[in-house]
Image: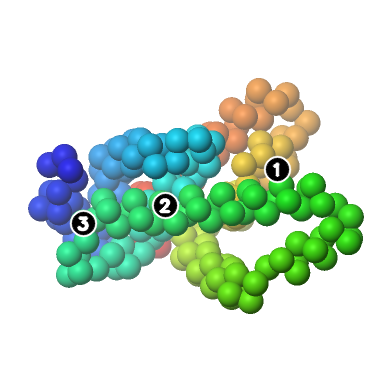
Amino acid sequence: MPPRFASSHLLPFHRRLCDGDRTVSDELAELLLTPMFERMSRQFPRADEHMLAEAVSEAFLDYCARPQQFDEGRGVPLVSFLLMTSGRNMRNLLRGEKRRKAREERAAPIHARSIVELDSTVGNLLQQEENAQLHRQEEDVMGLLQDPQDRQILALRLRGGRSTEAFAEILGIAHLSIEVQRREVKRAKDRIDKIVRRKGGHS
């Protein structure tokens, strides 16, 4: 583990974040996001890059919104905690993508019923728990945003939305060219991420 990821180096950042320092999230983002993405790319070598970036960003934003969820007393390094969260997010995204493809391939009602019957009771309970966790996480991060349009965009991202067209609809630019849509959607996402990091989990 590189020295910059050691607990002795990262814990001061964590404590400042818990104390309400709104600048530390930007510092941590510059320090951790790229290495975390690279580590996740090695862990999921065949995964879509946008999905990997979403898994890492969601883990980081959730941590910034609720830094107290990391318990330094347990002896787990902060970067390991964030990578574990990123990995869980990635597996959730992959399961969601698999379910989406299954629904598309089995559009007929009889096939849809077959999919439901294949789900075990344990699987259903785990899905309910995941949904509840994601809902709590979404409420925490959403509280950092005031603009209704920003909240709609973030909600779509947290639910796994990746279609440029879907974000363009929210922004009211669906009539523009796809190149302009992509540019404006990226600008909106970057601006929202900056707001969340700047607030550091304290609205």
Q: Which of the pair 90/162 is nearer the observer?
A: 90
Please state the horizontal and vertical placement of residue 40, each as a whole percent of the image. 39, 42
Q: Is residue 149 left or right of residue 104?
A: left
Mark 3 vs mark 2: which is more N-terminal? 3
Q: Residue at x 68, y 68 (%)?
A: 119
How crowded is the residue under tag 3: few (<14 C-alpha within 10 Å), some, or many (20+)? some
- Sequence-wise, the earlier of marks 3 and 1 is 3
**Which label's residue is closer to the chain start, 2 or 1?**
2
- C-alpha gap between disc 3 and disc 1: 37 Å
**What element does badge 1 sit on?**
helix
The amino acid on which the numbered mark 3 sits, given as a three-letter code, is Pro
Residue beneath the point at 73% across and 51% down: 102
Dividing the picture into quarters, in which one does residue 163 lie?
Answer: top right
Name which residue type carries label 2.
Gly
Left or right of residue 124: residue 113:
right
Q: Give the numbered dot on residue 77.
A: 3
Quadrant in which the N terminus is drawn? top left
Q: Position of residue 16 (x, y in %)?
A: 20, 58
Tag shown at residue 87: 2
Question: How far separated are the C-alphas under marks 2 and 1?
Answer: 26 Å
Residue 95 point in image, percent of width and height: 59, 54
Q: Nearer the viewer, residue 58 or 183?
A: 58
Q: Is residue 103 something one can see in this rendering?
A: yes
Q: Is residue 200 left or right of residue 154?
A: left
Q: Quadrant of the C terminus?
A: bottom left
The kind of residue tagged 1 is Ala
Q: Nearer the viewer, mark 2 or mark 1?
A: 2
Separation of marks 3 and 2 at Cα, in angstroms? 15 Å
**Residue found 73% across the figure and 24% down from its top:** 177
Q: Which mark is residue 166?
A: 1
